[in-house]
Amino acid sequence: MPNNMGNEHEIILGLTTTPGSDWRGKVEEMKKFSIERIALFPTFLKKAQREELYALLETVADLKIPHIHLRSDMTIKEIRYLESRFGGEVFNTHPEGKYHIQADWKDFFSKLYIENATKILEEKDLEKYAGLCLDFSHLENARIKKMPHYAATLRLAEKLPIGCCHVSAIRSSRFNPLNLYFGFDRHYLKDIREIDYIGQYKKYLPKYISLELENSFEQQLEIKRYLEKIISD
């Protein structure tokens, strides 16, 4: 059975920073809807933009960010700030190879989970880290396209702790050439049924289930309610 860090789940709205995401507007939405817990994906922001975002986040009362995606250019000082200022508990990043994991992050390796991507991960690749961060949309895309890292990721998920995860949309059309070429996983959800696929992965869900979506927080609140029903069925 997978070690998914217990059976209690918390679905967390995601503040993403991909080009289609209005991250400044999401901060204002947090105040409007009294949102006090988010997952943070500063994936597309360089240092100056991250500093702007952090300053905006500091204006949100009682904000906690338990799950944070780390960029390879983040300093240990920046990570310590995110932990102390916003209560960061678990962190994830991409595997070594295309991306770089800094050696001076070592004090956080016990809280750092490695995300599945297109690279086939082996147990030795994760042995000095806390475990696995499952990006379920990447996983489902690999299943649909019959890619070899699908089975490899599931083998790891059965052995290693799963400390956090990402949930994004999966397009339904199996015949759309764009989906076949670019993949079925998307950061913008068009139809609520695009997260139905999560039902087949329920046994792998960790404590923190983070929505990695460009959708507004108003939309994500609806998506969260829908996902709660999927998980509880």
Image (cartoon, rainbow, N blue to C red):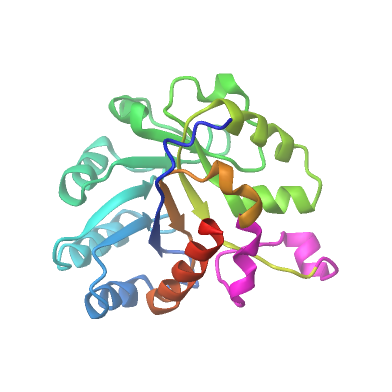
Depth order, front residue of 17/61: 61
Depth order, front residue of 157/8: 8
Q: Which residues are magenta?
A: 174-198
Residue extending furthest toward the front: 233
| Rendering coords of residue 211 (x, y %) | 46, 60
Give the left or right position of residue 150, taking residue 211 as reference.
Answer: right
Residue at the spot 70% in from the left edge and 32% down from the top edge: 152
Q: Is residue 69 visible?
A: yes
| Rendering coords of residue 140 (x, y %) | 68, 52
Q: To which quarter of the image does residue 59 belong?
A: bottom left
Quarter of the image containing the C terminus?
Answer: bottom right
Q: Is residue 233 above or below residue 81?
A: below
Residue at the spot 29% in from the left edge and 41% down from the top edge: 89
| Rendering coords of residue 223 (x, y %) | 49, 71
Q: How many marks?
A: 0
Does the stretch in magenta take in 197?
yes
Residue at the spot 39% in from the left edge and 45% down from the top edge: 70
Give the left or right position of residue 167, taking residue 201 as reference.
Answer: left
Q: Is residue 120 visible?
A: no
Depth order, front residue of 218/27: 218
Residue at the spot 23% in from the left edge and 47% down from the top edge: 82
Q: Is residue 178 above or below residue 212?
A: below
Q: Is residue 183 above or below residue 98?
A: below
Quarter of the image containing the N terminus?
Answer: top right
Does the stretch in magenta take in 23?
no
| Rendering coords of residue 145 (x, y %) | 80, 51
